[in-house]
Amino acid sequence: MRQENWFIFQEEICEHFNAIGAEAETNVSLTGVRTSHDVDVFVKTKFLGIDLKWIVEAKHWKRKINKGHVLALRSISEDLGVDKAFIVSSSGFQSGAIEAAKNTNIKLLTLDELKEETKGFIESEILKTYEARLDLLENRYWSHSKEIRIKYGLRHHLMDFQLKFTGQMLLGVARKALMAATVRKYPIILDTMHEEHQGEMQADNFQQLQNWFNLNFNHFESKLLAAEWEMHQNGEYNPDCILYTSDDVTPSKVMAKGIYMTEGNG
């Protein structure tokens, strides 16, 4: 029964990594500089375009992991030259083990902690794609004059009492949502105060936030495309193609920071 529980534990770890987009396999023999090593779970993935290799020891034991197991894994990790090594324990770790893992590439985690920590890598990558998409939207929006944006329905007029749609508000709320999601501070308020609001007013988790981004970015892109085509037909398509970089301070970043602080996230 103990062997069966360990096998299930190991396979669950492997399945988790595969589910978040990494390549993982169990019971792998890897050749290091000095010798070969049998690894419970071997993981290959990418982060920021860099190839990463991780190894995992699955310890479905009744006793806590001691310092000796950490030191042994440190030696294996160095010999194989992997980026990270994990010990995943069902019963926790002794204080000596925790001390031995400090300031190393060894991570000591429960299965739940492993799932929470590693999915953060994937969420971070996805958020970067939304940030890049937001940068493009912002550049397109601000390339048009205020008068043109009002004329073609990309923002409201100051005398309008009903806020049908304004690009700056959507950009600001989206930027604020990115700030909160980066530090995983949920729930995230998503109210743009628009009549044309898309999706829910709040995201309680990453999946709900993704849905909001997709709905609202698609809506904004559709409005921009329709407006720009109409500008072109009327001979009024004259964008100022000054390109913001990711490091530039933009109106939506200033607005996002203000909203973020107002919501008590200082």
Image (cartoon, rainbow, N blue to C red):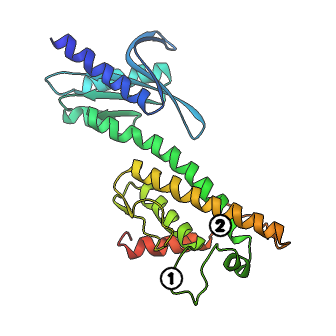
Q: Between residues 136 and 180, which one lies in front from this camera angle?
A: 136
Q: Distance between the residues labelled 2 and 1?
A: 32 Å
Q: Circle 2 sits on which residue?
A: 248
Secondary structure beneath label 2: loop
Q: As displayed, is residue 157 above or below residue 54?
A: below
Residue 50 in picture, x, y percent from top left: 59, 35
What is the number of callouts on the image? 2
Q: Between residues 62 and 34, which one lies in front from this camera angle?
A: 62
Residue 111 in picture, x, y percent from top left: 27, 32
Q: As displayed, is residue 263 above or below residue 5?
A: below
Camera sees residue 76? yes
Q: Which amino acid does label 1 sit on?
A: Gln
Q: How crowded is mark 2: few (under 14 residues within 10 Å), some or many (20 or more)?
A: few
Q: Between residues 152 and 207, which one lies in front from this camera angle?
A: 152
Residue 249 in picture, x, y percent from top left: 62, 70
Q: As displayed, is residue 107 above or below residue 185?
A: above
Q: As displayed, is residue 118 above or below residue 199?
A: above
- Res. 191 mark: none
- Res. 162 mark: 1
In-image side of 172 versus 243 (left or right): left
Quadrant (top left, top right, bottom left, bottom right) of the C terminus: bottom left
Q: Which amino acid does label 2 sit on?
A: Asp
In-image side of 263 versus 239 (left or right): left
Residue 107 in picture, x, y percent from top left: 35, 34
Give the residue at the far right of this rendering.
Answer: 235
Please tell me which residue is depicted at 40% across the width and 21% down the height of the picture.
75
Quadrant (top left, top right, bottom left, bottom right) of the N terminus: top left
Please tell me which residue is depicted at 68% across the width and 64% down the height of the picture.
224
